[in-house]
Image (spheres, rainbow, N blue to C red):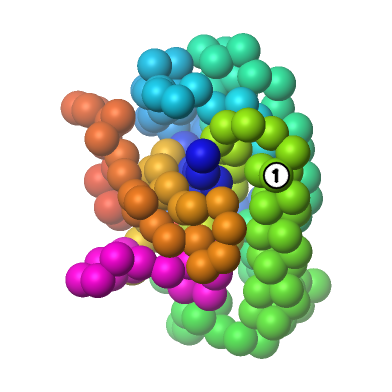
């Protein structure tokens, strides 16, 4: 029984390397990725018993594809949202002249990394509490930076494992439900084939 972290499907702004608004929907490839993800969990063993999601559109749509094949209702939480880049949203990542993902400071109207990390820690507390209430895996659909912070600050790994610099769209990472959250799988996108595969051009977290 595990906590399963899932990155949302690709959006057109992901592919264009643009910092996104909360209501950015999945693009055509992202919808195909979400359908493939849903098919993966339709035959998963053991079957997941709880499905939660960020309340941002791209995560909600990804979770809906899992719900459609598993019959699980989706429970949404703002704790699972991507980092808020404030007034930088809508701007091309490569036009900024700096890396806002690595910048610890709060962008205008957005979250500092300290505030963001605290929110991710609260999200993990919430996911642990949910797992204790059910008998099975908890699926959590979230975002690239959220999952990266979980992996770097809240997870542990078998010897020789490394954390990928970038998480693929709809990738699956599986953690033990209690601290130190030993990872059993990280950034797995084996459900994606052909044109649905993540081509690696986008920036996780924007």
Q: Give residue 110's quadrant in the image.
A: bottom right
User: In the drawing, does residue 147 fall left or right of residue 157?
Assistant: right
Badge 1 is on which residue?
132
Image coords of residue 163 (percent x, y): 34, 67
Image coords of residue 15 (percent x, y): 39, 47
**Could you tell me which secondary element the residue under label 1 belongs to?**
helix
Residue 135, magenta (yes or no): no
Q: Give the residue at x 22% y 28%.
A: 193
Of 88 and 178, which appears nearest the observer?
A: 178
Q: Give residue 56's quadrant in the image.
A: top right
Q: Give the residue at x 40% y 23%.
A: 44
Residue 155, magenta (yes or no): yes
Of 54 and 101, which appears nearest the observer?
A: 54
Compared to residue 6, the image places residue 190 above or below, namely above
Q: Which residues are magenta?
A: 150-164
Of 195 and 148, which appears nearest the observer?
A: 148
Q: Give the residue at x 54% y 46%.
A: 3
Residue 104 can be seen, yes or no: yes
Image coords of residue 53 (percent x, y): 66, 39
Q: Give the residue at x 56% y 52%.
A: 177
Compared to residue 150, the image places residue 172 above or below, namely above
Classify 10 Å Cα crowding around label 1: few (below 14), some (14-19), many (20 and above).
Answer: few
Image coords of residue 175 (percent x, y): 47, 53
Compared to residue 32, the image places residue 126 above or below, namely below
Magenta span: predominant SS is loop
Residue 12 can be seen, yes or no: no
Of 121 and 54, which appears nearest the observer?
A: 121
């Amino acid at each position: 029984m595990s906590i399963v972290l899932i990155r949302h499907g690709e959006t057109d702004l992901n592919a264009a390397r643009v910092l996104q608004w909360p209501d950015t929907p999945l693009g055509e490839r992202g919808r195909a990725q979400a359908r493939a993800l849903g098919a993966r969990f339709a035959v998963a063993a053991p079957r997941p018993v709880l499905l939660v999601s960020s309340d941002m559109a791209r995560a909600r749509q990804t979770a809906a594809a899992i719900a459609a094949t598993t019959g699980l209702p989706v429970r949404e939480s703002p704790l699972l949202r991507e980092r808020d880049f404030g007034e930088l949203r809508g701007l091309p990542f490569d036009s900024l002249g700096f890396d806002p993902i690595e910048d610890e400071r709060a962008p205008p109207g957005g979250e500092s990394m300290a505030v963001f990390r605290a929110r991710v820690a609260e999200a993990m507390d919430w996911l642990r509490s949910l797992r204790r209430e059910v008998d099975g895996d908890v699926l959590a659909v979230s975002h690239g930076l959220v999952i990266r912070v979980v992996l770097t600050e809240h997870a542990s790994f078998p010897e020789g494992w490394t954390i990928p610099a970038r998480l693929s769209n709809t990738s699956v990472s599986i953690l033990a439900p209690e601290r130190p959250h030993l990872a059993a799988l990280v950034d797995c996108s084996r459900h994606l084939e052909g044109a649905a595969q993540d081509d690696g051009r986008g920036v996780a977290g924007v």
